[in-house]
């Protein structure tokens, strides 16, 4: 079975299990639902560092960089969360894009321009199992797309440029919980796990955040996020390894409409 077939089968299985489990829940747990579509758009800044193992072919190295090191080589970045919900059902999309550039002098005396781009897009459906008094619990199901691109361009020597690209999709399942802390404050937890060797061997994500309601249309949030991806493909000269964890604090502003 191909990787894409395994991903489709895994995703269908987890969606089916989730829906069957939810169908068995008592109606008393499903209260306080608002009808009609509700939307939320949250641009945010994630001050993340990274660490882990990266390898291509027989070469493998430990990679570690603090947020300050990443920021010095940052060309552009985009991070946002978009969510839509109608009653118990909803979906959200989490795009994360970062473009890094650096010029280094090699031990052989020539310079090497390095461009690295990473795109991560989470897309998940949600089902609200419980909602009452500002508290809520959702189950999540979907996937996460990963795309890595690297360009190496030597200067001053007759050597060719090298381009590397790798992308894959991880099926994921998870949960999200929200706890009201008065009229304007709330605390939230979100976690998911996936990969299951259909994409990554193992991928997981965890977020803890506080929300402050400024008005019906605007709220502010801050917290800490972590994403870990253990992906490996190929063998020998074509082997690729990406076992990396990114984590750090974040701040954002949410627009509700």
Image (cartoon, helix red, strand yellow):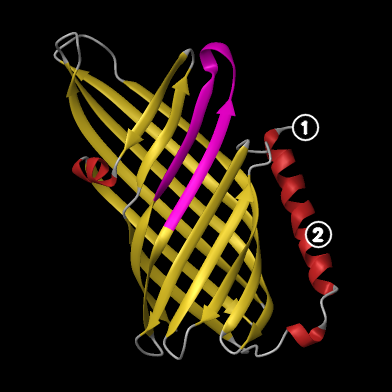
* Tag count: 2
- Above or below — where is 169 with respect to 111? below
Q: Residue at horizontal 46%, vertical 76%?
A: 40
Instruction: Specify the farthest residue to the front.
Output: 181
Q: Residue at horizontal 28%, vertical 33%?
A: 115
Q: Nearer the viewer, mark 2 or mark 1?
A: 2
- Above or below — where is 206 with respect to 211? above
Mark closer to the chain start, 2 or 1: 1
The residue that label 2 is drawn on is 17
Q: Quadrant of residue 254?
A: bottom left
The residue that label 1 is drawn on is 1
Under tag 1, what secondary structure?
Answer: loop
Residue 231, magenta (yes or no): yes
Q: Position of residue 190 (x, y in %)?
A: 55, 63
Which mark, by number, is residue 147?
none
Q: Residue at horizontal 46%, vertical 89%?
A: 182
Image side of residue 231 versus residue 117, left or right:
right
**Front residue of this view, candidates 173 and 90:** 173
Image side of residue 9 versus residue 159, left or right:
right
Image side of residue 105 versus residue 92, left or right:
left
**Front residue of this view, candidates 135 and 164:** 135
Q: Main secondary structure of the magenta part?
A: strand
Q: Quadrant of residue 111?
A: top left
The alpha-carbon separation of the residues under discs 2 and 1 comes to 22 Å
**Which region of the structure is painted magenta?**
225-247
Q: Residue at horizontal 64%, vertical 83%?
A: 131
Residue 16, magenta (yes or no): no
Q: Position of residue 67 (x, y in %)?
A: 28, 46
């Amino acid at each position: 079975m191909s990787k894409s077939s395994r991903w489709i089968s895994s995703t269908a299985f987890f969606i089916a299990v989730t829906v069957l489990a939810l169908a068995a829940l008592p109606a008393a747990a499903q209260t306080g639902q608002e009808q009609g579509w509700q939307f939320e758009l949250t641009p945010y800044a994630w001050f993340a560092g990274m660490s882990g193992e990266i390898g291509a072919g027989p070469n493998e190295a430990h990679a570690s960089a603090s947020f300050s090191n990443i920021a010095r080589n940052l060309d552009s970045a985009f991070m946002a969360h978009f969510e839509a919900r109608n009653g118990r059902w909803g979906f959200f999309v989490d795009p994360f894009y970062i473009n890094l550039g650096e010029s280094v002098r090699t031990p052989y005396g020539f310079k090497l321009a390095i461009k690295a781009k990473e795109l991560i897009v989470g897309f998940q459906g949600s089902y609200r199992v419980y909602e009452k008094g500002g508290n809520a619990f959702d189950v999540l199901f979907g996937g996460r797309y990963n795309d890595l691109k690297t360009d190496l361009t030597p200067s001053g020597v007759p050597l060719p440029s090298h381009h590397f690209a790798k992308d894959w999709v991880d099926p994921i399942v998870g949960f999200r919980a929200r706890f009201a802390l008065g009229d304007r404050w709330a605390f939230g937890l979100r976690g998911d796990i996936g990969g299951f060797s259909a994409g990554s061997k193992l991928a997981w994500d965890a977020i803890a955040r506080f929300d402050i309601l400024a008005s019906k249309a605007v709220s502010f949030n801050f917290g800490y996020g972590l994403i870990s991806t253990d992906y490996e493909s190929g063998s020998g000269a074509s082997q690729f390894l990406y076992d990396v964890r990114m984590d750090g604090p974040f701040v954002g502003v949410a627009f509700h409409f």
